[in-house]
Amino acid sequence: MPTIDKAIDAWVQRWRQRLDLPLRVVWGTGNTDGAPRAWDLGRFDEPKVVITVRDVAALSALLNPSLDSLGEAYVEGHLDVEGDIDDVLAMAHALVRDNAAHAGSTTLLQRVVKGLKHNRKLDREAIQYHYDVSNDFYATWLDPAMVYSCAYFEHGDEDLASAQRKKIDHILTKIRLQPGHTLLDIGCGWGALVLRAAQKFGARCVGITLSQAQYELARQRVAEAGLTDRIEIRLQDYRDVEGTFDRITSVGMFEHVGLQHLPQYFRIIRDRLAPDGWAMNHGITTTDPADGETPYGGGRFIDKYVFPHGELPHIATVLRTMQEGGLEAFDVENLRRHYARTLTLWSRNFEGQSQRLRGMVPERIWRIWRVYLAGCAWAFEHDQIALYQVLCRPAGRSAQELPWSRRWIYDAQPGA
């Protein structure tokens, strides 16, 4: 296919002039004699990454690369990649940054607030699409407690299981959870937080999720722990919860709410919170002050393949809508470095169990998750997205009720 060869020749020459990458591109069908052709984008003895083009559908992604176009070509099997996943991500970002800088257009950098409509049906379907892959799939690369959110590395050298336990203790200590308190956990996952809250802090808990798979395993874990009298797991939308609670936590859930619905979301938390209660919102935020997507098409890839209808607010938007919902922010902590580390460990676990994982799910699903975990680790590392814990309480309360300092967060022993 001489026309395709010429297009790749021109593409390679353009990049060689601007970059020197240890990257090799192989056109799988090759010349008319059937032999594959290969192009090197740099000067090296051995490439760190090899991209094999399987069909012409991958060429548009290579000729005008963005994270979503390259990711889609990989997920759909139009191209294959060989090499360490971190090197793959480094090559991809080098290509898309250079392309954006020389494109003469803002198309690849455009960050548009989608303004998607959220309703109960769409939210439930989005949650089930992401979380109901299978419990065994998640258990293969998560920690034993299956905590699927940013861990807390107090010293930086903790293993994943220890860091996840410290994250839960960090949250429960921040909200000043005491024996006998009632706790609502919005988006309870597989139950790790409510189990810890009941076992170590003596709380009475309700955990809610929209994932059938999470609901079933969380209930099983509660029963196995002998805590059915202290923990109730519900398959329930947060908008349908009634009553009041001394403490409320929401960990890795509000990314699904939608920007336009944040004031209502925080108002519901306020309405469910006791007058002297404390709440914690732990969630991913964009670093774009305009609440836009992550750059170079990364956000579009995640929206299409990973988190349908997800929207990330800037921390300024979180604080504003929290106040609009009747909550006063008291403590704001940025855990971006912690999530970069968490995702790196998840990605390493995923790579180390690739053969097993590929046997669990279709190839397309395996490719989606491989790119997603490594890509998000990159995004947190390079300040494209962040993770904030915001401790809050009902607005309008007397200043006399507020602590003088944050000392209790760091001095208290778990469960004390």
Image (tube, rainbow, N blue to C red):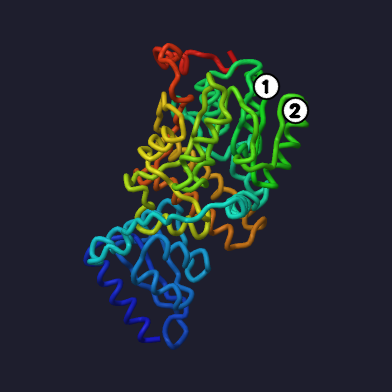
Q: Position of residue 312 (x, y in %)?
A: 43, 46
Q: Position of residue 189 (x, y in %)?
A: 62, 39
| Residue at the image point whose x is 43% and y is 59% from the top | 300
Q: Are marks 1 and 2 in contact (CB under 8 Å)?
A: yes
User: Is residue 316 visible in this depiction of the protein?
Assistant: yes
Q: Quadrant of residue 232?
A: top right
Of 33 and 225, the residue lying toward us: 225
Of the image marks 1 and 2, the number of the one nearer the N terminus: 1
Q: Is the residue 214 above or below the residue 5 in the image?
A: above
User: Is residue 370 visible in this depiction of the protein?
Assistant: no
Q: Position of residue 285 (x, y in %)?
A: 41, 42
Q: In whole angstroms, how far apart are the C-alphas of marks 1 and 2?
A: 9 Å
Query: In the visual, does 133 lie left or right of 40?
Result: right
Of 270 and 380, the residue lying toward us: 270
**Residue on which the image places disc 2:** 225
Inspect the image, locate mark 1, and give the three-letter code of the amino acid beneath it: Gln
**Residue on which the image places disc 1:** 199
| Residue at the image point whose x is 47% and y is 67% from the top | 73
Of 222 and 74, the residue lying toward us: 222
Label 1 residue SS: helix
Q: Quadrant of residue 289?
A: top left
Label 2 residue SS: loop
| Residue at the image point whose x is 70% and y is 47% from the top | 212
Inspect the image, locate mark 2, and give the three-letter code of the amino acid beneath it: Ala
